[in-house]
Image: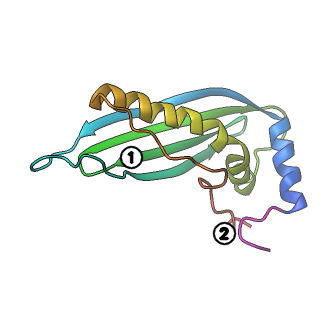
Amino acid sequence: MVDNELTDEDLSAIRDLIQRSELRAIEFHEVSARTLPFDGEPPAQEDANVSIQLEHRAETKEFGIRMIGSVTNSTKEVRVAVAAEYDMTAGETPVERTILMFANEVAVMSLCPYFREGVSSVSAKVFNDPLLLPTIERGMIKYDISDNV
């Protein structure tokens, strides 16, 4: 099996979790921006470094996926953490692999617009110029499930 390739059993588990879960909330856990110390004139145009990680938790009747990211260059730093909170109906708590697959296939795409808006909004307020994230293609932000067989 190729890393992160989904089996028929995986797809069935994701579909089952989708059927018995309901998005309860999208919550911002952190939205911050700051100007970093610099010497001399800041560069006129500079590429930003974007770093994004995912966290998850699962309990008996609920689970959550959090996207935490930073956008930095030599003079600016923006941090945003946004979480999707889900309620589950009947059934057992899904195994970690199922939560990770759900995150990759469903939750990440739900969180991306909020993450993008958080970065743009706070940077516009702090720097008077919004930082715009590059295009994020499906699958660029994901858990590596190859270790969670």
Question: Within 10 Å of the Cα at label 1, are there few (<14), some (14-19), or many (20+) other Cα atoms?
Answer: many
Q: Tell me where residue 127 appears, x and y as whole percent.
A: 28, 32
Quadrant including the C terminus:
bottom right
Quadrant including the N terminus:
bottom right
Report the span colored magenta.
1-6
- Pointer 2: what residue? 147
The label on residue 24 is none
Please, is residue 87 above or below residue 141 in the view?
above
- Pointer 1: what residue? 71
Q: Upstream in the sequence, badge 1 or badge 2? A: 1
Mark 1–mark 2 distance (CA, rounded to whole Å): 28 Å
What residue occupies the far left of the structure in this picture? 40
114 displayed left or right of 59: left
Q: Main secondary structure of the magenta part?
A: loop
At 73% from the left edge and 34% from the top edge, which residue is drawn? Answer: 61
What residue occupies the far front of the structure in this picture? 44
Q: Nearer the viewer, residue 135 or 144?
A: 135
Q: Nearer the viewer, residue 28 or 77?
A: 77
Q: Is residue 48 magenta?
A: no
Q: Tell me where residue 148 appears, x and y as whole percent.
A: 69, 65
Q: Say which amino acid is labelled 1.
A: Val
Secondary element under disc 1, as helix, strand or loop, is: strand
Q: Say which amino acid is labelled 2.
A: Asp
Quarter-of-image position of residue 33: top left
Q: Nearer the viewer, residue 35 or 85?
A: 35
